[in-house]
Each structure stands twice: as C-alpha cells, then as structure tokens.
Amino acid sequence: APLTAPPAGVALALLACTAQAGYLVCVQRIGDAQALDAFSLLYANSALSLPLVAAASVLMGDFGDAAGLSMRHAAPVWQHAAWRENGFAAAFVGSIVLGLALNFTVFLCTLVTTPLTSVVTGQLKAVLTAVLGYALFGNAVRPVSVFGQSVTFVGGLLYSYAKYRDAARRDEALRAP
C-alpha cells in the first residue's frame, strides 16, 4: 500500500517535530543557565504559554464569541453537552492531571539527560502506545504503520547504543594515563 498522507499533514508533522526539538533544547539551556529545577521550568513555561494559548482559544471561539473575535461560530466550552454526561468532568480533570504529569516528566527527563534522549524516549512511548492500541482496542494492523513503528523502535535502539558507546569511550579516555 503506498503512503497516502496528505502533504499538509506531512508538513505539519515535520514542523511539530522541529518545534519539539527546539523547545526541548531551549528548556535544557534555560534550565542549565538559570539553575532551575523541573517545577520552576514548568511554571515559567506555563506563564509564557498562557497568553498564546488564551489568544488562540479566543480566536477559535472556545469561550464563545461575545467580542466578535472568533474565527468560527461555536458554543462556549462550558455549554457543551458532554458536561451533562456522568463521568465527563472526572475524565476531563484526570486528563488535565495526566497532561501535567507528562509535561513534568518531559521537563525532568530533558534536564537530567539531553533533549534528544527526551525525544527518543517519547518515540519509544509512542511505539508502546501503538502496540497497546493494537492489542487492547483492535486497531487495524497495516503494513505501513508496522513499518513506521519498526523504524521508530530501531532508531531508538540505535541511538541508545550510540550514546552507550560514546559514554564508554569517554570513560575509557578518562581512565587512560
């Protein structure tokens, strides 16, 4: 089966990967330069991101269109029908807590290791998520998706092996007289 991803989707995926790599490099550099811990970095990131996210939410109409700024006509989030369903609020709050935990662990991983390590562990998490999706939810296993997951997994293994070899060479060089 040929790859049928739309060019705009491929371009957005590449842009997202590039933005994530740059973002993680900035997190590590700022954390090192300012001697910030993961909580402080997470707080600073949230404070800096909030105005951009709030502006995007207003433009997308997530809070209604009282000011006439929305690009689409939608009901405010709090008027959505799902709020009346049992368990939705609990799932919503749980999702927020898991998102916070994920951000904290990514920041901590980036501070303790390197941005590239954070990206690779994220990709390995994606492989595990895909395998669990196939197993638990009966997602269709297609050759293209298996190939993509395999490339991701092999890339993660090769990167880990290369980092291990680099560390072993550095240790050996330090021990040599």
Image (cartoon, rainbow, N blue to C red):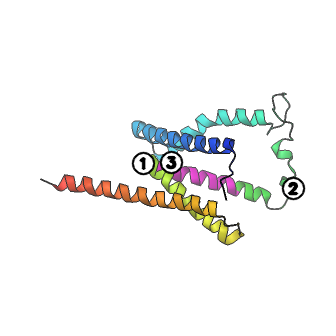
Per the image, is 61 magenta? no
Numbered tag placed on residue 107 in the rendering: 3
Residue sitting farthest toward the front: 2
Camera-nearest residue between 115 and 14? 14
Q: Which residues are magenta?
A: 94-111
Camera-nearest residue between 33 and 43? 33
To which residue does mark 2 refer?
84
Q: Classify mark 2: residues with Cα within 10 Å, few (<14), some (14-19) or many (20+).
A: few
Foreground: disc 1 or disc 2:
1
Secondary structure, mark 3, is helix
Q: Main secondary structure of the magenta part?
A: helix
Q: Residue at x 68, y 55 (%)?
A: 95
Q: Give the Cα separation between the discs numbered 2 and 3.
A: 35 Å
* Mark 1 or mark 2, earlier in chain: 2
**Rendered location of residue 54, percent (x, y):** 70, 35
Foreground: disc 2 or disc 3:
3
| Residue type, mark 1 in image | Thr
* Mark 1 or mark 3, earlier in chain: 3
**Rendered location of residue 2, percent (x, y):** 66, 55
